[in-house]
């Protein structure tokens, strides 16, 4: 595994640790809080979608073809998962991703509908998706006065924010 891929995994682990902290902070009850937006209108639905997208990214590393065929529309996520189930699925998917990455050729690429991306670029895109949701979750916490995890406040230097 190249240093670049190892670095991309580290960035992924940073983003994912923030997501995990949110789930742990919210717990089952907090996952059901209604958010002021259509479709992904609870914290839980965000996490369910984030997992589905990560599964698509991991599958693409294995097959070398990006596809979101198994992802639902944002309106189709049910938001019924427990915190424990979400954390388990994330850990399982993270483990699978690292296992696949440890076995790939350093020159492997992923085809994104005719555009070839390096695996490092592919993982960076996955990190961007996770970070997009983290930003949304932080904003929702501010708007709804939902307590944020201390780890997230510190990791992002969110001045003026109390955990």
Image (cartoon, helix red, strand yellow):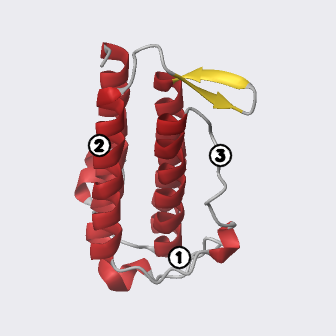
User: Which residue is more in the foreground, 125 or 29?
Assistant: 125
Marks 2/3 in contact by CB < 8 Å: the verdict is no
Q: Residue at x 46, y 44 (%)?
A: 58
Q: Which residue is mark 2?
A: 155
Q: Which residue is mark 1?
A: 42
- Neighbor class of circle 3 (other Cα within 10 Å; few <14, some 14-19, many 20+) is some
Marks 2/1 in contact by CB < 8 Å: the verdict is no
Q: Is residue 161 visible?
A: no
Occupied quadrant, residue 73:
bottom right
Q: Which type of secondary structure does the marked residue at label 1 adopt? A: loop
Side of 68 where 119 appears, left or right: left
**Residue 110, percent across and down?**
58, 28
Q: Is residue 113 visible?
A: yes
**Mark 2 and mark 3: Cα distance apart in space:** 32 Å
Q: Residue at x 30, y 24 (%)?
A: 6
Side of 157 where 128 appears, left or right: right
Q: Which residue is mark 3?
A: 67
Q: Residue at x 30, y 57 (%)?
A: 92
Q: Is residue 18 above or below residue 155?
A: below
Q: Is residue 48 above or below residue 118?
A: below
**Residue 138, percent across and down?**
46, 58
Q: Which type of secondary structure does the marked residue at label 3 adopt? A: loop
**Residue 20, percent across and down?**
30, 59
Between circles 3 and 1, the one closer to the viewer is: 3
Between circles 2 and 3, the one closer to the viewer is: 3
- Neighbor class of circle 1 (other Cα within 10 Å; few <14, some 14-19, many 20+) is many
Between circles 2 and 1, the one closer to the viewer is: 1
- Which mark is first along the chain, 1 or 2? 1
Q: Residue at x 52, y 54 (%)?
A: 133
Q: Is residue 72 above or below residue 127?
A: below
């Amino acid at each position: 595994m190249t240093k670049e891929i190892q670095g991309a995994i580290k960035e992924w682990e940073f983003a994912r640790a923030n997501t995990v902290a949110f789930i742990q902070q919210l717990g089952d009850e907090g996952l059901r809080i209604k958010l002021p937006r259509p479709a992904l209108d609870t914290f839980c639905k965000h996490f369910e979608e984030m997992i589905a997208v990560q599964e698509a990214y991991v599958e693409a590393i294995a097959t070398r073809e990006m596809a979101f065929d198994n992802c639902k529309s944002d309106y189709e996520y049910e938001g019924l998962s427990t915190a424990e189930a979400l954390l388990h699925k994330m850990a399982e998917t993270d483990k699978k991703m690292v296992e696949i990455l440890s076995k790939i050729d350093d020159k492997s690429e992923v085809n994104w509908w005719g555009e070839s991306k390096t695996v490092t670029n592919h993982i960076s895109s996955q990190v961007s998706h996770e970070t997009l949701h983290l930003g949304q979750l932080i904003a929702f916490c501010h708007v709804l006065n939902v307590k944020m995890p201390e780890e997230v406040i510190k990791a992002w230097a969110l001045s003026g924010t109390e955990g």
